[in-house]
Image (cartoon, rainbow, N blue to C red):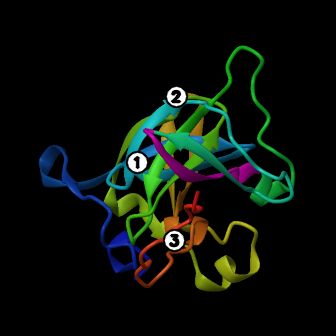
Amino acid sequence: MNNYSDTNLSNLSQTPANQGQRSLKLLVFSVGQLNVALSVDIVKKVVDYTTIYSSGLNHMGMARIDDREITVVDLHKRLFNVSQPMPSHSRGYLVIARNSVGETFGILVSKAPSLQDIPISQIRTLPESYRRSDTLEIASHVTVISQQEGSLTVFILDVDRIVVPVSGVIGELPDLSYPL
């Protein structure tokens, strides 16, 4: 009942793994003490940190990536009300992804993300009551990854709760030229 296949995120990739077991490729990164992930299907790329323009009043900013302006989200600020601290030896990275309507956005991360292949059977849906009451409402699923040092709990993010899809078609832009 609470397994991955019962969810509203059916667009996440499912790839065959050893012995016919279905798995999901995740890009895992940390936000403070939390470990979070995105499906590789929605990740376009990971780029070095670039200048982010923001008022500083909230967790959203803007950056120019590939000759386009995109929204950048500081998840650390959204979750903990404090900006993502960056290590002194690195300026960090931007994970460039897209939401369900194709809007491109970036997530600020301090350390390089890792790629993990997780069996679908190990992914669980978070209860809706938990999502409604916790600051981690942006996560839809959870998994535990076994590592040599112990286990790593990873929350799988729902991109539509990070950057809410804007419906409707944007009309033609008005002419902003001034007569000479």
Q: Quadrant of the N terminus?
A: bottom left
* Disc 1 versus disc 2: nearer the observer: 1
In whole angstroms, how far apart are the C-alphas of marks 1 and 3? 17 Å
Q: Residue at x 49, y 32 (%)?
A: 47
Bounds of the magenta segment? 66-76
| Residue pointed to by mark 2 | 148
Question: What residue do we see at 51% from left, 71% from top?
Answer: 160
Q: Earlier in the sequence, mark 1 or mark 2?
A: 1
- Residue farthest toward the front in the current orientation of the protein: 180
Q: Are marks 2 and 3 in contact (CB under 8 Å)?
A: no
The x, y position of residue 54, in whole percent, is 76, 50
Q: Amino acid at mark 2?
A: Gln
Where does the image place residue 56, in percent across and percent down from the top left?
Answer: 84, 51
| CB-based contact (under 8 Å), mark 1 and mark 2 | no
Q: Which mark is residue 26?
A: 1
User: Callout 1, which amino acid?
Assistant: Leu
Nearer-N-terminus badge (1/3): 1
Q: Disc 1 to disc 2, how far (Cα)? A: 19 Å
In the image: residue 12, left or right of residue 158: left
The image quarter containing residue 115 is: top left
| SS at mark 3 in the image | helix
From this viewpoint, is residue 88 visible? Answer: yes
Residue 168 placement (x, y as % from top left): 43, 85
Label 3 amino acid? Answer: Asp
Q: Earlier in the sequence, mark 2 or mark 3?
A: 2
Residue under numbered circle 3: 160
